[in-house]
Image (tube, rainbow, N blue to C red):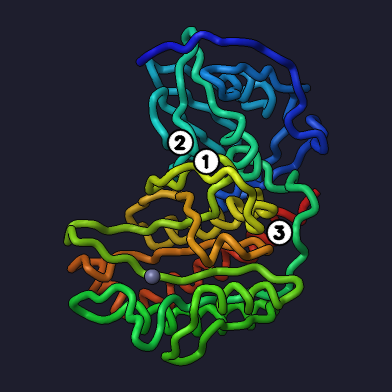
Amino acid sequence: MRSLAPQHRSRRNLFPSSHPALCAALALAACLCSTFSASGKDWNVVSLGGREYVTDENVAKFYGFQRFAKEGSDRIFKHTHLIMTWKVGSQSIYVNNIKFNLSFPVVDSGGKAMLSTVDLAKLVDPVVRPSYIKKPIHFDTVVIDAGHGAHDSGAVGPFGREKDYSLDMALRLEKNLQAKGFKTLLTRRQDVFLTLSQRVAIANGQRNAIFISLHFNSSGSRDANGIETYALAPQGTRSTNGGSPWSSPLSGNVRDAENIALATAVHAHVIHELRSVDRGIKRARFNVLRGINKPAILFEGGFVTNQTEGKQIDDPAHRQRIADSIAAAVVKFRTAVAKK
Ligand SMILES: [Zn+2]
């Protein structure tokens, strides 16, 4: 692994609104509440190859992790109910065993593991202390988007079609959320076709709402399986699946922190509850995420093209369990961002 030499250093408060002490945060990935007392005062920002980074030690100190260990290229940060692991050279980190895809890999500089300030501000901070998200939405409505419809079947597997599964799961999620006291709006309730911009317009027409788009996956490889959840890629970063970095801001980027917090809550709940294969929380610029000015995610609930997973998805009881996990995650997200 190439070790990068720092080009300049500056001390800065990357989160001007945050008060470093006495922070009660909910670790969204933990499904548990923990008290997180950040003890550091500011960040020592280092420029490497034209990009800004912070060190592993700075992260450990700022958030007041009770234990911080270096094991070869691994870094382990531990706090009550929260374990975060990094690996130098990797573009993924784990928080409570949930996989997150970074916008930039963790790099080495003089034996220190360095995290980009983009990933610090747009991923780690909103995930480990969502209560610090600035001006979070106070929502009472969940817009549920069943992917595809009519002539657009989406993924087709040996047991059924994505458009039918996504609509069925949307109706199950609606029922559960209504029982929890939320208002709901489905972008479609029948086997009809909507353009992506129609779905965006429905979401943006609601006031205090979040948006959850429900999909199932397909692959040419019959072995592909597992759950993945997408949040909009931050400005200036690549999507997880490639493409060029998008430099201009998108309307969805105003919700970057809430997007990743919502993705974390939903993804972690489903992975924990269903013990599914974790393909990670990923970044994309899907049309349905780009234009939505509310917290928004796109959830892929498994591969209809995989023999085992496709059979599970075809089982209504399995879809009910996913819907129940997502509903519980919505409650978790609302509590986490509202807590001060
Ligand atoms: Zn789809």
Q: Residue at x 66, y 21 (%)?
A: 61
Amino acid carrying mark 1 in the image: Thr
Quadrant where the image shows the N terminus: top left
User: Which badge, 2 or 1, is on the more N-terminal residue?
Assistant: 2
Q: Quadrant of residue 313?
A: bottom left
Q: Secondary structure at mark 2?
A: strand
Q: Write down the residue under mark 2.
A: 93
CA–CA distance between discs 2 and 1?
17 Å
Q: Dot 3, crowdedness within 10 Å: few (<14), some or many (≥20)?
A: some
CB-based contact (under 8 Å), mark 2 and mark 1: no
Q: Is mark 2 within 8 Å of ligand 1?
A: no
Residue 82 pos. (x, y %)? 56, 38
- Residue 137 placement (x, y as % from top left): 75, 61
Ligand 1 location (quadrant): bottom left
- Are dots 1 and 3 in contact, CB under 8 Å? no
Q: Is residue 235 above or below residue 275?
A: above
Q: Position of residue 35 (x, y in %)?
A: 70, 39
Residue at the spot of label 3: 335
Circle 2 crowding by C-alpha within 10 Å: few under 14, some 14–19, many from 20: many
Q: CA distance from mark 2 to mark 3?
A: 25 Å
Return the residue at label 1.
237
Horizontally, residue 81 falls left or right of residue 75, namely: right
Comparing 200 with 100, the one in front is: 200
* Label 1 crowd (10 A; few <14 / some 14-19 / many >=20): many
Kind of residue at disc 2: Ile
- The quadrant in which residue 273 appears is bottom left
User: Is 49 drawn above or below residue 212 in the view shown?
Assistant: above
